Image (tube, coloured by chain):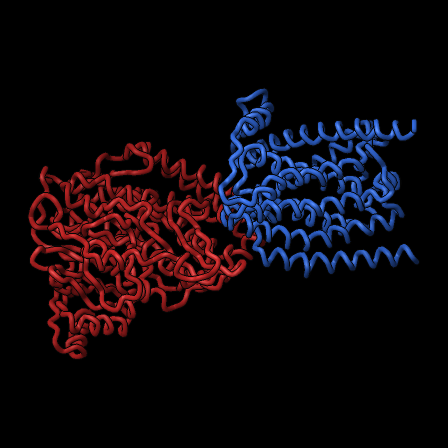
Chain colours: A blue, B red
Amino acid sequence: MAIMGKELARLIIGLIGVLVVVVVNALLLTWAERKISGHMQKRIGPKEVGPYGLIQPIADGLKLLAKELLTPVNVDRPLYYLAPVIVFIPVLVSFIVIPFDGYLQVKDINVGILVILAFSSLSVLSILIAGWGSNNKYSLIGATRSVAQNIAYEIPLLLSLLPVVFMANSFSLRDIVEVQREGWFVWRWQFFAFLIYFIAATAETNRTPFDLPEAESELVAGFHTEYSGMRFALFFLAEYTNIFIVSAIATTFFLGGYLGPVLPGFVWFFIKTYFLVFVIMWFRWTFPRVRFDQLLNFSWKILIPVAFANLIVTGGILKL
Amino acid sequence: MVKEISEKIKESIGSVEPVETPYDQRGYHLSIEATQANIVDITGFFDRIGFYLADMCCVDYIDYLEIVYFFNNHSKVCRIRVTLKVDPERPSAPTISHIYKIARWYEREIHEFFGVLFEGHPFMTYLFLHDQIDFYPLRKKQVPVPEKDKRLLNSFNPEEQEDGFFLNLGPQHPSTHGVLRVVVKMNGEYILSAEPILGYLHRMHEKMAENRTYQQFYPNPARMDYLGALNFNLGYVTTVEKLCGIEVPERAQYIRTITAELNRISSHLLWFGAFVADLGGLTPFLYTFDDRENILDILEAVAGSRLTYSYFRFGGLFNDVDDDFVKNVKKFIDRLRSRFSMYERLVTGNVIFINRVKNIGVMDKTYPLKYGCSGPVIRSIDIPFDIRKHEPYAAYDRVDFEVATGTNADNMDRYLIRIKEMGISLNIIEKALNDLPSGPIKAEKIPKKLKPPKGDIYHTIESPRGELGVYIVSDESDVPYRMRWRVPSYSNLMTFPELAGGSLIADAIATLGSYDLVIPEIDR
């Protein structure tokens, strides 16, 4: 009983902590995105609200909270209301197993990465529900694109993580980090896996150049065309949190997680993660968008075969 | 060339009397009066000898309506006017839309503005006007719209007509840069058919022209094409000058050339940013705006406005340029030249960009004749047709320049041509600046009330988007009797349904972007 109570308390505190991290991270990333895009486009970005415009995301969040929640007439109401809520669940669950530091982890599950992958494939469900429930053609096209894209890119994503699991001999995220005390996996034979993972992760999070589900010039805003106010904000929040999660996984699997000299572990973790987030943002403000068939071809014809080859070679070498 | 055609057409049709006209005063070489019986034959004749339908309009002379067709040739300029008299009581004419596809839109336009019914036209609905209009706006006397016409005009309703999955691109849609609406029928990601719907920005500049003096019409052309405002301004003033026989001083001609080219560059720069933004790359837009800002500053200093200029006046200019202008333009030339290599690295060489535009939206070799498209769109089909070269106006015949062409007729070619054209424009500006003569900037003795002699004139210039034609009929009063604007985007856009059919929606949007459409210009 006492053990269960302790466990429960840890989970509750952990979840509250995760919520705080999620919200603060999303605020920070929206600010960073605007600031980075600003500087890349020879602008300044937000600067009026707070020092360097740091309070801007809070002002925007308040505006979104205060806005009327518009519901278009012909939507499928249960689905329309449900979508922004369930977009958030997989995001929260994924946070539970991420090791921010040696002991800063809500729960170390011995199939940690499987939990993340299983739940993150749920997020596509919410996009589909949003697109279908909105009863809007742009939303529906965006949603169907999103499903096809997620199916195509989840496979290379998984295949690029498996070699690392082979080498670490564990599914637990903390074990994987601890194994990297001998050297980061990105330098230990898994550079291609890292590249494949990063490309697939960019596609999974629907970021440019793979932002087809919300391709502005084609589909207005894609699956969240009909959403406004806080419902829209939830999609937005989920998008930025997803970027953080995929970067966090990349850090954990390939860049040695919280390992690093001098500074405390969680600082190293955040430095590495936010660097990858920056790279993803950098993509967005540099590349044009790929076409839908090119996107699918790239996954099925290049990424998946290469990832498979990498997996087989790694497995073979380990066995020998 | 003119004599040859004149003889050929006499031989081929028989009952026509071609009259040679002075090109310097009228803007066309040959005038032919057609009848209801032989107009289709005459049109067919021009189609066979490789002429395109440059323009088609109607003039109400109260006793009769006159439909005016303009034909021209891409290789050697030979403009031919064909007129067809129509009874104003029961106006009707045979359609030529089966020969020249662009006539489909011209005839719809004439129908809703004048009430001329084209027999055999497949799709006689409203083009610009909305369904509440119950008169023909360009008729001199008010004529009510008959019930039969009203039904005909309202017959387009895509959702009810056919079954299928319809998507509206526009009028409020990020891809259309304005208020163009394209109704596309789709099968998954593929477009089965597309139909552009115009008129969301229709302001009837042609009717406005009939209600104000020539001078009062100065600001209007800039509102038609807000990106190539100076070029439209130039088209208007050169037409009226030609009609009145006003000689423009040499310095004014050179300054016109320089400023019009600056305007062309600013238009192309904006297009460049918008085109890449259409493909999802949002950053170049801001970079090109940064460059464009320089041009706007330079032009603001001489013309007084930044976007909708009316800098050119009959007989000259509003304002002379100073040394600062020359200095700033030279500085800008150096700046933009150094930027091209950056654009090359950032955009032109990008693999994703190349995959999105190369071999996409490939135009057929027959389009220039069928649709009369012009500008960079036609130059991408390896037709070096440029009015600046073929019918020089301002000082274009005194500066030497090349015409950029492409051979693949795809989006990449249209992109590269516009990039090259910016460089060519820079060369033109540089040469014109070096040769800039001194002297007056305005012709003497321009009357306050301009009353051009009786007659008509058709004059064309090369706007950033292609062939801009102005047709003015004067009745010796101080207001134009009829003014007609032939705008380039109109005929360019008409090729879109053919290119979009069967393509992916993302490609269709790239193609739409490659036209460099300005919707207010199409809608007028």
A195 in relation to B404, above or below: above
- Figure quadrant of residue B2: bottom left
Residue B449 position within the rendered picture, expressed as x and y whole percent measured from the top left: 9, 39
From the viewer's side, name the closer residue of B28 and B295.
B28
Q: Is residue A308 visible?
A: yes
Residue at 71%, 27% (x, y): give it: A20
Q: Does residue A251 appear left or right of residue B82 in this picture?
A: right
Residue B79 position within the rendered picture, expressed as x and y whole percent measured from the top left: 21, 63
Residue B186 position within the rendered picture, expressed as x and y whole percent measured from the top left: 49, 59
Residue at 18%, 75% (x, y): give it: B9
A44 in relation to B453, above or below: above
Q: Does residue A19 appear left or right of residue B372 in this picture?
A: right
A203 in relation to B36, above or below: above
- The quadrant of the rendering that contains the N terminus of chain B is bottom left
From the viewer's side, name the closer residue of B404 and A93.
A93
From the viewer's side, name the closer residue of A246 and B48.
A246
Residue at 54%, 53% (x, y): give it: B353
Q: Is residue B434 visible?
A: no
Q: Does residue B500 appear left or right of residue A75 in this picture?
A: left
From the viewer's side, name the closer residue of B291 and B142.
B142
- Figure quadrant of residue A32: top right
Residue A29 position within the rendered picture, expressed as x and y whole percent measured from the top left: 64, 32
Q: Does residue B2 appear left or right of residue B335 in this picture?
A: left
Total label count? 0
